Image (cartoon, helix red, strand yellow):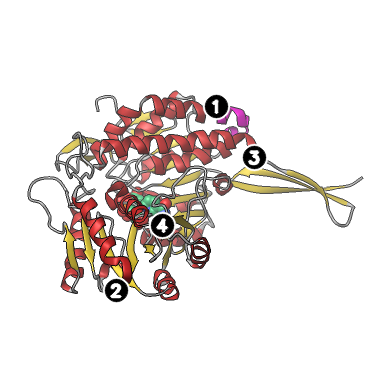
């Protein structure tokens, strides 16, 4: 912890907030304060914006190979420091070390992927249909970007945005979530070490997100917002972005259906459920939120899932053998408790878990609820905790209608051994991603994102860099 930066990163320098303010970072496993980091105000945000704007023109002119190699070097440094970064993430966020190591690898992979994409930005030359004019097309970086990230994947949500922005030639102001600023500050230090020029990435940690970000969005110098977080905050930021017509990418909330048909392989379905539900303690936008299980296999599926969930070891993420760490904070846990209480009041059966343990830390046990009333609040809210809610269905049309009956559309999971059904159901689900007989869809090489109120645009994959590029068209007469 002693080497981890705790100041703001502006113009390549580590600086205190201009008024000297700091904010605490808590360990969710103990409730104790780990350290204090700089707490930026609007003046600091303006300095960070200025640094990004000043660096933009020159950065846009760097050779793609130079940008590519900086990302590649940063990828290597992250991998070399896997253990150190994993410990840092676990201490501020709570996830077990094994998961934190997995996230470090996942986060680093975005840098490797976009180091490869940086040198493949293409353009075009064509003769227009009239034969008298040519069209010369080039791709330009969109300009200085504001990146806003959540606390649940502190490293990967940063690299998923910084990677393509660096590759495209954009400069940035990054505002991480106040619960997990340390991972982002460590990332900035790594990028500096990898040779990223001053001012290309600036990081402002703050407890005053609205005051810090709104002037940047309205000011007209930030040309792009890339946001990952809740739909409610995304809607607010979209409205603020409208003022200066800022281009936006929105990775918002989900309410994933997990559908198990009567012809599913139940071993695969339970394995998939464990991943889709328990990755990151259920604190993931991709977390399965509503388990729709065919009536004929619901009891068996519930029994097997409860057995697996009940065998998980809950405890501090730094302890050996722990599978499930604490939730992010007391507010997050209180929300999970309320959702479970509401479902139980409406008749849900608790197959396992459901009781908050005594003692310090924000722990909540893996919980399986069966016979959940569709009117329960957790059907229309991201649970963001280790709670699997099982409902039954009788036929395919019915389950598709119910799965789609939500304003969100990030991801869906489908378990069936029938190829026709697998494709038919996937095509009818209103989601950006489908896990077919698998509980994991995230991969840096695939376009991640949702439809409906789950967002706009895609991150990762071949298209991830497009979000940070504009076309410029030159009209050239044929002489
Ligand atoms: P959140 O409350 O929306 O916050 C996300 C980020 O936005 C934080 O840095 C937050 O800072 C900031 N923020 C909040 N209000 C703001 C404002 N007025 N102006 C500027 N920034 C503002 O979400 P969260 O609780 O951290 O994260 C959980 C949510 O993220 C879930 O809904 C989850 O589904 C979603 N998520 C989506 C994806 C995806 O790829 N689709 C991935 C991960 C998470 P403060 O905390 O200081 O307000």
Circle 2 is placed at which residue position? Answer: 374
- The answer to whether the residues at label 1 and label 4 have Cβ atoms under 8 Å apart is no
Q: Earlier in the sequence, mark 3 or mark 4?
A: 3
Main SS of the magenta part reads helix
Circle 3 is placed at which residue position? Answer: 121
Residue 231 seen from this side? yes
Q: Which residues are magenta?
A: 56-69
Ligand 1 within 8 A of label 4's CB?
Answer: yes
Q: CA distance from mark 4 to mark 2?
A: 23 Å
- The answer to whether the residues at label 3 and label 4 have Cβ atoms under 8 Å apart is no
Location of residue 256 (image quadrant): bottom left
- Image quadrant containing the N terminus: top left
Q: CA distance from mark 2 to mark 1?
A: 52 Å
Q: CA distance from mark 3 to mark 1?
A: 15 Å
> Secondary structure beneath disc 2?
loop
> Secondary structure beneath disc 1?
helix
Q: CA distance from mark 3 to mark 4?
A: 27 Å
Circle 1 is placed at which residue position? Answer: 69
Circle 4 is placed at which residue position? Answer: 252
């Amino acid at each position: 912890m002693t080497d981890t930066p705790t100041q703001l990163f502006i113009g390549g320098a580590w600086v205190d907030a201009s008024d000297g303010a700091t904010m605490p970072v808590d360990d969710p496993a103990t409730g104790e304060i780990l350290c204090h980091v700089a707490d930026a105000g609007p003046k600091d945000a303006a300095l960070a914006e200025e640094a990004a704007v000043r660096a933009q023109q020159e950065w846009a002119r760097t050779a793609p190979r130079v940008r590519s190699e900086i990302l590649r070097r940063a990828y290597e440094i992250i991998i070399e420091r896997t253990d150190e970064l994993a410990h840092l993430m676990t201490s501020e966020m709570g996830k077990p070390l094994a998961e934190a190591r997995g996230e470090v690898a996942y986060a680093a992979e975005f840098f490797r992927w976009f180091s490869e994409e940086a040198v493949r930005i293409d353009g075009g030359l064509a003769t227009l249909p009239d034969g008298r004019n040519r069209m010369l097309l080039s791709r330009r970086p969109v300009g200085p970007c504001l990146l806003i990230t959540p606390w649940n994947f502190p490293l990967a949500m940063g690299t998923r945005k910084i990677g393509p922005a660096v590759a495209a030639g954009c400069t940035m102001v990054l505002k991480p979530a106040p619960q997990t600023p340390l991972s982002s500050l460590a990332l900035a230090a790594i990028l500096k070490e990898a040779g990223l020029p001053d001012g290309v990435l600036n990081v402002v940690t703050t407890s005053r997100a609205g005051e810090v970000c709104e002037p940047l969005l309205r000011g007209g110098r930030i040309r792009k917002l890339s946001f990952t977080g809740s739909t409610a905050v995304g809607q607010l930021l979209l409205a603020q972005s409208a003022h200066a017509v800022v281009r936006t990418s929105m990775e918002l909330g989900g309410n994933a259906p997990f559908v198990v048909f009567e012809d599913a392989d139940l071993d695969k379905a339970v394995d998939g459920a464990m991943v889709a539900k328990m990755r990151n303690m259920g604190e993931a936008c991709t977390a399965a939120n509503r388990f729709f299980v065919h009536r004929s296999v619901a009891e068996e599926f519930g029994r097997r899932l409860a057995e697996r969930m009940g065998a998980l070891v809950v405890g501090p993420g730094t302890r050996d053998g722990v599978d499930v760490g604490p939730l992010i904070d007391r507010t997050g846990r209180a929300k999970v408790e309320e959702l479970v209480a509401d479902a139980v009041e409406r008749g849900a059966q608790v197959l396992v878990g459901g009781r908050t343990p005594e003692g310090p830390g924000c722990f909540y046990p893996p919980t399986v609820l069966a016979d959940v009333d569709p009117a329960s609040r957790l059907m229309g809210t991201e649970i963001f905790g280790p709670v699997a809610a099982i409902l039954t269905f009788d036929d395919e049309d019915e389950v598709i209608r119910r799965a789609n009956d939500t304003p969100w559309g990030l991801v869906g999971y489908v378990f069936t051994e029938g190829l026709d059904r697998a494709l038919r159901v996937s095509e009818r689900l209103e989601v950006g991603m489908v896990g077919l007989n698998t509980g994991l869809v995230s991969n840096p090489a695939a376009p991640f994102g949702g439809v409906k109120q789950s967002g706009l645009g895609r991150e990762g994959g071949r298209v991830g860099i497009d979000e940070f590029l504009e076309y410029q068209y030159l009209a050239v007469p044929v002489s």
